[in-house]
Image (cartoon, rainbow, N blue to C red):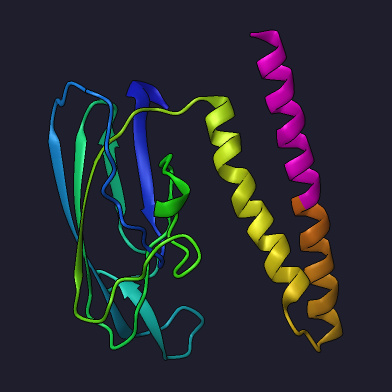
Amino acid sequence: MKNNSIIIIVLLLFANFLQAQEETTIKTVREYKLEIAKNKTNITGKDVMGMTVNGTIPGPVLEFTEGEQAVIHVKNTMDVETSVHWHGLLLPNFQDGVPYLTTPPIKPGATLYGLRAQKPISDIQYMKAMIPHHSSAILVSNNVNLKDPEVIKLSKEIIKAQEKEIAQMKAAIERIENNN
């Protein structure tokens, strides 16, 4: 990516986004307002109720550059709790966005306010941030009560692929750390 651009795709889970940052020279402040709502959607040719961010699935792309500050307001207009999980940001586990496991959920009618000064992450930081995601896919796949043979087969393939990628990332981390 040129210019150290950071692109964040808003998924349908959220973390308490406020985090203490090292001193950074702030070039620009970008402010975003996101609304999580239950709306009728049609992705497959059939109308269904779905969770949307600003009326769409997936939600909008938020973009900011190294040194800029992002201020993000996330309002939950649904009648159930929810959260947002961020990709493209290095965050502490507490802000990862898994409700009740790592992050408190956003209550119905509540708005979360987040502030973040983004810095690009290194290869090692990227891989260390991705390993928990792969691990959670394994955890879910191992503990789900599946009945359909095709889905069971797919679940086993997911576990195998995730384990392989975790091993590759751990080997790359070790190689990079040993060469520096």
Q: Is residue 173 magenta?
A: yes
Asked whether, in this view, residue 159 is left or right of residue 139, the answer is: right
> Which residue does the image show at 15% across and 42% down from the upper left?
30
Image coords of residue 36 (percent x, y): 28, 73
Asked whether, in this view, residue 26 is left or right of residue 9, the answer is: left
Q: Quadrant of residue 119?
A: top left
Asked whether, in this view, residue 39 is left or right of residue 48, the answer is: left
Query: How many marks are shown on the rendered structure?
Result: 0
Split into 4 quadrants, where in the image is the C terminus?
Answer: top right
Image coords of residue 78 (percent x, y): 28, 84
Q: Residue furthest top?
A: 180
Does residue 108 sit above or below 31 in this rendering? below
> Which residue does the image show at 13% across and 31% down from the upper left?
28
Image coords of residue 23 (percent x, y): 22, 23
Does residue 93 sit above or below 171 in this rendering? below
> Which residue does the image show at 31% across and 84% down from the upper left?
38
Q: Which residues are magenta?
A: 163-180
Does residue 61 sit above or below 65 in this rendering? below
Image coords of residue 25 (percent x, y): 17, 21
Q: Quadrant of residue 176?
A: top right
> Which residue does the image show at 46% across and 78% down from the upper left?
43
Helix, strand or loop for the magenta stretch, by majority: helix
In the depicted view, which residue is nearer to us: 7 or 159?
159
Does residue 114 sit above or below 45 in this rendering? above
Q: Is residue 34 magenta?
A: no
Q: Quadrant of residue 2?
A: top left
